[in-house]
Amino acid sequence: MIRWLKRNWKFLLGVLISILFLYLALKGLQFDKVWDTLQSANYIWLIPGVAMYFLAVWVRTWRWHYLLRPLKKIPTRTMFPIVAIGYMGNNIYPARAGEVLRAIVLKRKEGVPISASLATIIVERIFDGVVMLAFVFLNLPELARLTTDSGFVGSIQSLAVWGAAAFIGALLVFLLAAMFPKTAENWANFLIDHLIPQKWRAKVCDLTFRFLSGLESLRSPWEALMIFFTSAIIWLLETGKYWFVMHAFPFEVSFFALMLMNGIVNLATTIPSAPGYIGTFDAPGIALLKAHGVPGEIAAGYTLVLHVALWVPITALGAYFFFREGLKWNGEYPETEERK
């Protein structure tokens, strides 16, 4: 039992955090009214919402194709199933393991080194974080008006400041490493020589330089601007899904309010939780809508349906591609050069 707890403590911690967030999300709600809201919703609006989301996933695929061009030119249509598998993995495995999964699948199908493709995935996540924070900062005047006794929303301003420092700081480090590769390699060699034991240095050095090769797409300001622009398009399309799903329920807030909700809930899902971002997605979303004057039961019904609509379609599609590739749930894959 103790051994099992030691091996699974991260998963258990995530479950406990999800339970806490679910308690905060559902506290004080009348569940019969939530059920009435779900029964009366006009679910036909989910069709254009899901279509909008898959368009965003296609643009995500194009962005990854764009980031990978210096390593290997791979058609977007070839990469779409790999991206779907990755997002399925994020939804069912803990700790966003789908990001590693899609790097492994890309290695198997196209021979791209795992460490290099992981570098491009991290770049994606950094740009996503910057765009999410931009959504929050664009709505700071509105947010300031909502912060009086508004639960999670009340502390989001300070969280946005710290989050901005973290994401923008990481982005600057990556941009500098991409624009000055020789300097980055020299620093990497210095740190490896002074911090890594002798027996591991060769392996760490090899992985580090492959990782740095994955940053080549950031070597010009134009390339970085293009990735940022694409990231903004992705998240605006996803906000479009929030907008369509809203029409299934008897309330209306502005598109900017939904941009703010999108930014807040996706920043909140970086907190460790049970697979599928249970609780960490729902609690801040409900709190924000309540702060905009939406009744709690309607806010809860909308957020639940939105969460399911974001989770089920891409997970089902990713599972289809997963089994089509002959992959296994237990993570047993043929050995690759980097994993031997």
Image: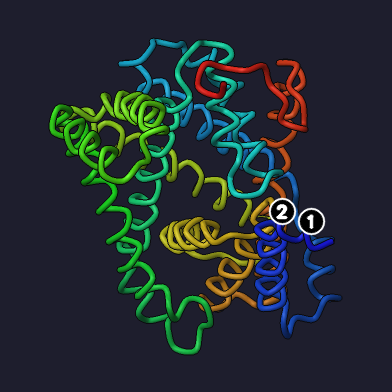
Name the quarter where the N terminus is drawn: bottom right
Q: Residue 329 sits in which quadrant?
A: top right
In terms of depth relative to the viewer, which is nearer, 186 or 142? 186
The residue positioned 14% from the left and 27% from the top of the image is 182
Task: Measuring from the top left, give residue 276's x and y in whole percent.
Answer: 68, 51
Using residue 282 as the reference point, say whether residue 125 is left or right of it.
Answer: left
Name the quarter where the C terminus is drawn: top right
The residue positioned 60% from the left and 31% from the top of the image is 101
Residue at mark 2: 7
Task: Measuring from the top left, give residue 31's x and y in whole percent.
Answer: 83, 76
From the viewer's perspective, is residue 212 above or below residue 294? above
Pointer 2 with pointer 1, Cβ within 8 A: yes
Give the amino acid type for the residue marked by disc 1 in the picture.
Answer: Trp
* 3D distance between C-alphas at marks 2 and 1: 5 Å
Using residue 82 as the reference point, say whether residue 223 is left or right of it.
Answer: left
In terms of depth relative to the viewer, which is nearer, 121 or 242? 121
Residue at mark 1: 4
Using residue 115 as the reference point, say whether residue 283 is left or right of it.
Answer: right
The residue positioned 42% from the left and 83% from the top of the image is 147
